[in-house]
Amino acid sequence: MIDTHLLQQSFANHFGGEAAVFFAPGRINLIGEHTDYNGGFVFPGAVTQGIMAMILPNAGRNVNLYACDLQRGCSFNLMDEEGPAETHFRYVYGVVRELLAAGVPVQGFDAVYGGDVPLGAGMSSSAALESCFANALNELFGGGLDRMTLARIGQATEHKYVGVNCGIMDQFASMHGREGSLMRLDCRSGEFEYFPWHPDGYRLVLVNSCVKHTLVGSPYNDRRASCERVAALAGVETLRDCTWERLDALRPQLDDEDYRRARYVLGEVDRVLAVCEALGRGDYEEVGRQMYLTHDGLSKDYEVSCPELDFLVNEARRMEVTGARLMGGGFGGCTINLVRNELYDCFLAEVQRTYRSRFGVDCKPIPVAIGDGAHQTKP
Ligand code: GLA
């Protein structure tokens, strides 16, 4: 839970005045990993954890921020070309600069913010931060931009100010989430559909390996570059449009690593569609089977797992959990698990016990509830 009282107190201490309050969530993703920047499908939902910001325009040209969780502040001028050096504050700086470039008349403001998305857990705390400010500043300064444009502003922030060439999934989910629904987004066309998510008899739970993941400076960009090389050779814009036949025909020209990256992506595009069909029949066992296949691909072909995540998924498999896989970009963070109700408590107790005895540290279960996208909570 976000401590709204602490935020209020902090705003009063640092700035004072009646601030408007905005919230934007982190996300989960049922299936469709590393498909977004390949023009494929993703299947995310917003969670109830997120970032909350109290914001008040200050009639000047300076932005003054205080991050409660870091207990640190930062100020920059709207016209500052460089911006703050610290990555954390560059998320807000980037959003401000991109909004200005899109013609939103952002003025100076004071803001205090904090959240309850665990950092480095692969639940998109950075997208929550970007979406919270993109939506808030668009509202407060009458930008009139639609939600997809705001999501793209968050994504551009990652690319240009942080150096992560991410896809659109995280910012999309944070902007478009709806309580009780997952969303299937076609990242090639931008079309999406809400799927009510009430898996009778099952629950979703994340298990945080507590291996801190960061995509900044990680091989995430290398994975994307591999995919782009194969797409260029195949003569398609993104791997979404590459067929299995085409990939097989190209195989002799590809180095093995690029081939395996592409094989994973083509498989994952197919798996999202298989999951949609299975959901239509209410066949959650099949959904879970596909999740395990995704993990195997992410671990062996895409190589974005780590021993801790592999261990968590293997434990789930051993205990006959319906489905489990690493979630998000990889290199640490959480697994997402689809667990039958009767197995739920036993699975969590057992996995915590074995994880501790194997790695000497605790993993942390995070129950999932599907919540709403970015919104204002107080005028
Ligand atoms: C990160 C990125 C997303 C997506 C996932 C992997 O979360 O920000 O765009 O590529 O990794 O599916």
Image (cartoon, helix red, strand yellow):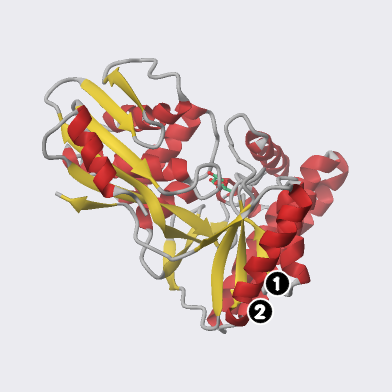
Q: CA distance from mark 1 to mark 2?
A: 6 Å
Q: Which residue is mark 2?
A: 285
Give the quadrant of residue 13. top left
Q: Residues within 10 Å of mark 1 (few under 14, many from 20)?
A: some
Q: Is residue 297 above or below residue 293?
A: above
Give the quadrant of residue 30. bottom right
Tell me if 60 is positioned left or right of 118 in this view. left
Q: Nearer the viewer, residue 272 or 191?
A: 272
Q: Secondary structure at mark 1?
A: helix
Q: Who's the residue at 34% across and 56% down the image?
A: 373
Give the quadrant of residue 97. top left
Q: Position of residue 204 (x, y in %)?
A: 55, 68
Q: Residues within 10 Å of mark 2 (few under 14, many from 20)?
A: some
Tell me if 68 is positioned left or right of 236 in this view. left
Tell me if 55 is positioned left or right of 345 in this view. left
Q: Which residue is mark 1?
A: 289
> Farthest residue in the right direction?
252
Q: Position of residue 271 (x, y in %)?
A: 66, 65
Q: Amino acid at mark 2?
A: Glu
Q: Position of residue 288 (x, y in %)?
A: 66, 72
Q: Nearer the viewer, residue 296 or 316?
A: 316
Q: Is residue 207 above or below residue 64?
A: below
Q: Who's the residue at 82% across and 53% down the image?
A: 248
- Residue 171's tag is none
Q: Are marks 1 and 2 in contact (CB under 8 Å)?
A: yes
Q: Is residue 222 above or below residue 304?
A: above
Q: Who's the residue at 74% across and 72% down the image?
A: 319
Q: Would residue 357 be seen by someone viewing this image from the given angle?
A: yes
Q: Who's the residue at 38% across and 29% down the image?
A: 94
Q: Secondary structure at mark 2?
A: helix
Tell me if 257 is positioned left or right of 51 in this view. right
